[in-house]
Image: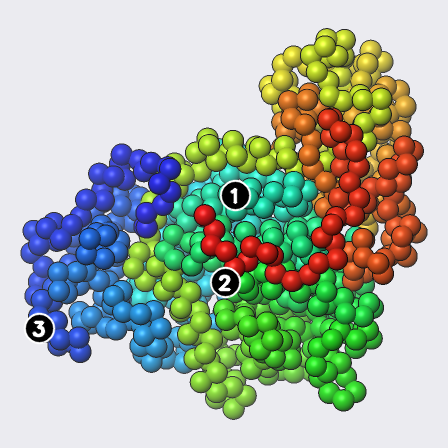
Amino acid sequence: MASLSKQIKKSSKLRRTVLTSTLALTLLAPVMVPQANANGNEDLGYVDPTTTANPGNSGADIATYRVQADPATGQPEIEAAKKVVLKVDGKQFRDLSGNKLLDTYEDWRLPVDQRVADLVSKMTLAEKAGLMLINTHTPIANPADGRYVKADDSMIVAKNMRYVIFRQTPTVDVIAKYTNQLQELGEASRLGIPVVVTSNPRNHASTDYTNIAASEGQHSFWPGPLGFAAAGDTEAVKEFSEIAAKEWRAAGIRKVYGYTADIATDPLWARIEDTFGEDPKVASDMIYNVIKGFQGDKLGKDGVAITVKHFPGGGARDNGLDPHFVEGKFNPYPTEGSLLKYHIPPFKAAIAADVSSIMPYYAYPSNDSADQGLPWFSENQQFEEVGFALNKSILTDFLRGQLGFKGYVNSDTGAVGNNAWGAENLTAVQKMAKAINAGTDIISGSSDPTLITKAVEQGYLTEDEINKSVTLLLTEMMNLGLFEDPYVDPQHSLDVVANPEAQQLADEAHRKSIVLLRNDKNLLPLKDAKLKDVKLYVEMFPAGTDGASTKGLIEIIKKHDPSITITNNLEEATHAYIYVKPVQSNWDNNPRITVGPETGITNVDRIIDIQKKVPTITAVNMTNPWVLDEIEPNAAALIGTFGTKAEAIVDVIRGEFNPIGKLPFALPASMTAVDNEVGDVPSFAPEEDSAYAYVNKAGHAYKYGFGLSYNQGKAIGKPDHAGETGKPAHAGKSSK
């Protein structure tokens, strides 16, 4: 369990249990074994952690033997639960192979590439194949014995898998115990290869993926990526990522399936919520800082590896249809050069930031597209119409050859299986071989390593090609420090996420993300002088079962600002505050962005009635650029939010915070405008329909970058950098 934030003190319990030293090891009287290793060490001893442990080092669920880091000698922190710890030349090492000799791959003093090469040479083909798969792993729910993982777990033990996706949201101490138990199984295996636990982002609200809110024992809660884009504060993104990395590291989650570098060019696409909006420059800056925050300047033992997705950009859709489904299986590029100009820049920024891995999308590039400026696949075909994870021209020639990517490629879940578009005629073994030969290094959504071993046995793949992928994966593991200490302390994980300073910074980010779109007659802010005469009616849309969501919102407002007088009687209200939260799920396979029953708002007429009755502050949570032509005209004030805490909206309404957010995408005037838009370019691109954006009764167009404040009340139009592409200016600079 590596040292974490200098700003967050470890618990006294943890400090008491970390005092193992060379002296302590000597006092344990290690059993000596004959010197028989290639390193020629004279002093070789070991300690068996199953009989000599430091109780509590990683929580009561696991007894481990731990060696404290010693910067003076270079000794890293190491921790073992199942295999012995060797003492060599006064330093200590985990004996992962169990042979009581110091193998090259166990020697932390050696360069990573040398260690990895040694380990690859020792692995069987079956072990390599298992390493090249990643799939969802689900802990046992509420186990009576505290064991979240079976001793004979089918993925880790039977199939040699070492990358798993974790999707649940228990408190972080439970996560820590779960990840520790996975690491026990990894350590107990033949070569002791550790486990990399992966998750979708878990510090934000999410419609379809890992969804959290502010609650005890959970990760700090921040606005969604769109909110960061609205705030336009890249330093805040870096700050968030550094804090989140400490939280993830403390719980034992070491890899993010994120963040999303896709550009939101098709407003109908249900995954816009996960993006940084429609501006390639902003998305590039955000992605660069997310990577540097999570990984550090160089991926190391305190870092969390990032998998940027979905190469070469998932935002170029056909009427919002997603390639999780056959109807949306292709990427259309109707605009000449749009791929390189608008969709690739964030991936260039990710590569400049040394991102650990990149995930291609399910789709294939359509040959109905305009010329995209890449070398043609053949004389008659611009692209090979096969999914990006199986597309050699895209991965090997373009991503690695032209863009210079050095990390590994992680397929999307099922993209080399049932969703291998363009390769439907291939067998499962042939699909696997085609993907790996194309440049994909780890296959998501599969738990069958025999598909890889059969591909080698049947001549579709060479073991040399397998070794390239395995080398990249093991290099990430080594850099993360998992071969020295994969274990974490559950109590410490709770201490890390309970840091009030982190949530204060998150709350500030929430306030910065809010966009004020309309403010008739300076209705806002409701400062004390105005508030004394205000009786506020509050309603949430949807209200929830028996009005539970509305009641919850009212309770938050009362607790956060008791000076607000709230009435449940619209007839006596002087003002109203309504919070509208439309939703569409990607899994519906039914793209839609109108506000109505189709997006969960069953009573639009009620919204309009309230707005006509009293001056109404209307807040809309924008997971998509919704068509607001029904609920906007009668609003007295309009606020855009992006997975924002209710308390932050109250702060803006009350004038405790002057709104500074700007729209991260344009809002369409109508569904006719949506039908006329160009799906592969941002709204501010010269190729886009100039009449696309909604215009309110004051003549303000809700274009990209629009936002009002109480001080200036002035709209912002097209950003100065809208036409720029390429990596951010700071890409070559070291972060502070």
Dot 3: few (<14), some (14–19), or many (≥20) neighbours within 10 Å? few
Label disc, if present, on residue 354 of the rendered structure: 2
Towards the viewer: 660 or 20: 660
**Quadrant assignment, res 705:** top right
Figure quadrant of residue 516 = top right
User: Mark 1 touching mark 3, by CB under 8 A?
Assistant: no
Q: Secondary structure at mark 3?
A: loop
675 vs 546, nearest the viewer: 675
Whether residue 374 can be seen here: yes
Give the CA separation, mark 2 to mark 1: 19 Å
**Label 2–label 3 contact, CB within 8 A:** no
Picture coordinates of residue 519 (x, y %)? 81, 27
Identify which residue is drawn at 83% across, 37% down: 602
Quickly name the residue at label 3: 34
Residue 124 image position (x, y, % from top left): 37, 80
Q: Could you tell me if residue 46 is visible in this image?
A: no
Q: Return the residue at label 1.
A: 240
Eye-nearest disc, 2 or 3: 2
Q: Amino acid at mark 2?
A: Asp
> What number is the disc on residue 706?
none
Report the amino acid beneath label 3.
Answer: Pro
> In the displayed structure, would residue 124 be above or below residue 80?
below
**Measuring 82% from the left and 67% from the top, which residue is drawn there?**
335
Which label's residue is closer to the chain start, 2 or 1? Answer: 1
- Amino acid tagged 1: Phe
Earlier in the chain: of badge 1 and badge 3, it is: 3
Q: Which one is in front, 56 or 612?
A: 612
Task: Name the element at disc 2.
Answer: loop
* CA gap, disc 1 and disc 3: 51 Å
* Residue in view at x 38 percent, y 52 percent: 302
Relative height, residue 394 to residue 548 (above, below): below
